[in-house]
Image (cartoon, rainbow, N blue to C red):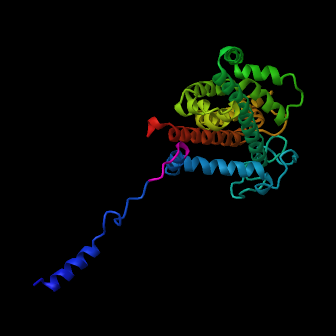
């Protein structure tokens, strides 16, 4: 006679044990793209966080300088002697960083100088990326005579010294506004971006998925903007991020030499302060500090982005 108690217990145990189909399956890990992996690395990188905070503050000053000072950077009061020491207790007041030789607030000029320098840096970088990116993509994808012509044109511009060429171009303008300075720097600075984009496109266009798209009859526009550009643009973004600080430094150098912006800029104030450095060091000190911090922030951001996008560094 079968043991009914044991049979019922065995059945209960068998019901409690999940079958292969019922067993919980491990969740399939969603594949991340290059940009997804890079973003995860960047969020953990303290250099990226610090540089991003600094750049965000600079962008806020650029967009809304009136929030940081109520003083006019151009109008001065000759009663304010530039030999008067900065009054460090009056934070964000016109007298906080002292005055220059014409009685203008050094603090207000530093704030509005931030606006001019950052606008030149961003505008030049955008133009250089567009111009160099288009030239490099066309040369790399089509090859042949188009590549030869565009590459020789790139070599010609690459042979022109950047600062010397900018000085020659800007010297022909009497009123050197922000758009004119951006145009001059972009006119001479697109060559490196074109070379980087060309090399990246030549590598990407040999990939299997690009060849498969061609075999399936995809047109050139779809191949370029759907398959090649998203995968070839990473090195260009790294170059653009690092170059942004270089363009800001170039604008300050040109302004220091008297061939940069005609209005308020860090380079003009550094040049003015250099003539009075023995008696009033503060005129040159604060624009120099802001310029160094700004250039360093963009270079740090570029290095962080480069490390995140380069698989060899992981």
Nearer to me, 247 or 112: 247
- In-front residue for pair 219/140: 219
Q: Where's the C terminus, which quadrant? A: top left
Depth check, front residue: 151 or 62: 151
Snapshot quadrant of residue 271:
top right
Q: Quadrant of the N terminus?
A: bottom left
Residue 233 lies in quadrant: top right
Q: Residue at x 80, y 48 (%)?
A: 105
Q: Residue at x 71, y 41 (%)?
A: 287
**Region of the chain picked out in magenta, as a range:** 29-35
Q: Residue furthest left?
A: 1
Q: Position of residue 73 (x, y in %)?
A: 83, 46
The answer to whether residue 203 is seen in the rendering is yes
Asked whether residue 33 is drawn in magenta, I would say: yes
- Residue 278 visible at all: no
Magenta span contains residue 14: no
Residue in the image at 35% along x and 63% along y: 21
Side (left or right) of 230 relative to 28: right
Tell me if 256 is positioned left or right of 16 in this view: right
Q: Main secondary structure of the magenta part?
A: loop
Quadrant in the picture for residue 240: top right
Give above or below for 102 relative to 243.
below
Vertical placement of residue 115 versus 7, above or below:
above
Of all residues, the one furthest to the front in this rendering is: 1
């Amino acid at each position: 006679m079968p043991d009914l108690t044991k049979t019922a217990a065995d059945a209960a145990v068998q019901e409690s044990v999940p079958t292969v189909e019922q067993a919980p399956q491990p969740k399939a890990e969603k594949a991340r793209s290059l940009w997804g992996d890079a973003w995860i690395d960047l969020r953990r990188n303290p250099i990226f966080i610090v540089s991003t905070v600094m750049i965000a503050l600079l962008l806020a000053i650029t967009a809304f300088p009136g929030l940081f000072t109520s003083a006019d950077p151009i109008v001065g009061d000759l009663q304010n002697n530039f030999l008067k020491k900065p009054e460090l207790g009056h934070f964000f007041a016109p007298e906080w960083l002292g005055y220059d030789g014409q009685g203008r607030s050094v603090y207000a000029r530093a704030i509005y100088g931030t606006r001019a320098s950052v606008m030149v840096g961003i505008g030049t970088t955008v133009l250089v990326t567009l111009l160099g990116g288009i030239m490099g993509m066309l040369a790399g994808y089509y090859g042949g005579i188009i590549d030869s012509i565009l590459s020789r044109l790139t070599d010609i511009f690459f042979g022109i010294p950047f600062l010397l060429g900018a000085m020659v171009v800007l010297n022909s303008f009497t009123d050197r506004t922000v758009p004119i300075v951006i145009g001059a720097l972009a006119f001479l600075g697109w060559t490196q971006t074109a070379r980087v984009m060309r090399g990246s496109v030549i590598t990407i266009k040999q990939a299997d998925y690009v060849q498969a798209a061609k075999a399936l009859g995809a047109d050139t526009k779809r191949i370029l903007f759907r398959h090649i550009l998203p995968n070839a643009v990473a090195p260009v973004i790294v170059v653009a991020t690092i170059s942004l600080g270089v363009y800001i430094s170039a604008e300050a150098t040109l302004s220091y030499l008297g061939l940069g912006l005609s209005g308020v800029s860090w380079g003009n104030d550094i040049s003015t302060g250099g003539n009075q450095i023995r008696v009033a060091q503060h005129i040159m000190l604060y624009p120099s500090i802001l310029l160094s911090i700004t250039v360093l922030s963009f270079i740090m951001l570029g290095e962080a982005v480069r490390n995140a996008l380069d698989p060899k560094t992981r």
